[in-house]
Image: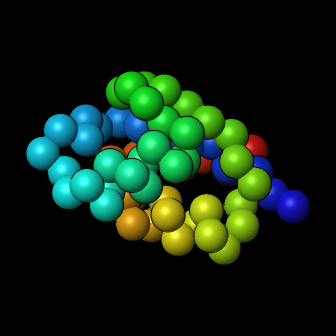
Amino acid sequence: MAQIKVTLIKSVIGQKPEKKATVRSLGLKKIHSSNTLEATDAVKGMVAAVSHLVKVEEI
């Protein structure tokens, strides 16, 4: 299965708690932190929900 690299590029300060939890569940803590994940439907949905906060690259 394909993998994607997700990087947090914007702060979660001022975001709703649901968005903060989504970012945290993607394994991102601080700005410019990255995580490599399997590109499952669940992960793609989470990335779409916080697309304004993260950058996605296919590996």
Residue 48 vertical position relative to residue 12 in the rendered view, above or below = below
Residue 21 vertical position relative to residue 9 in the rendered view, above or below = below
Along the viewing direction, whichever of 52 and 20 lies nearer the viewer: 20
Q: Position of residue 50 (x, y in %)?
A: 37, 58
Residue at point 45%, 67% (across, down): 48
Q: Position of residue 55 (x, y in %)?
A: 45, 45
Q: Which quarter of the rendered picture does the C terminus lie within?
A: top right
Quarter where residue 1 is shown: bottom right
In the displayed structure, does residue 42 sit left or right of residue 47? right
Q: What is the tally of numbered marks visible in this picture?
A: 0
Which color mode does the image show?
A: rainbow
Residue 31 vertical position relative to residue 3 in the rendered view, above or below = above
Asked whether the viewer can see residue 43, the reply is yes
Quarter where residue 24 is shown: top left
Residue at point 70%, 48% (across, down): 37
Name, please, the residue furthest toward the left.
Answer: 14
Asked whether the viewer can see residue 55, the reply is no
Residue at point 12%, 45% (across, down): 14
Residue at point 48%, 36% (across, down): 28
Q: Position of residue 13 (x, y in %)?
A: 18, 38
Q: Position of residue 56 (x, y in %)?
A: 53, 49
Name, please, the residue furthest toward the right.
Answer: 1
Residue 44 vertical position relative to residue 24 in the rendered view, above or below = below
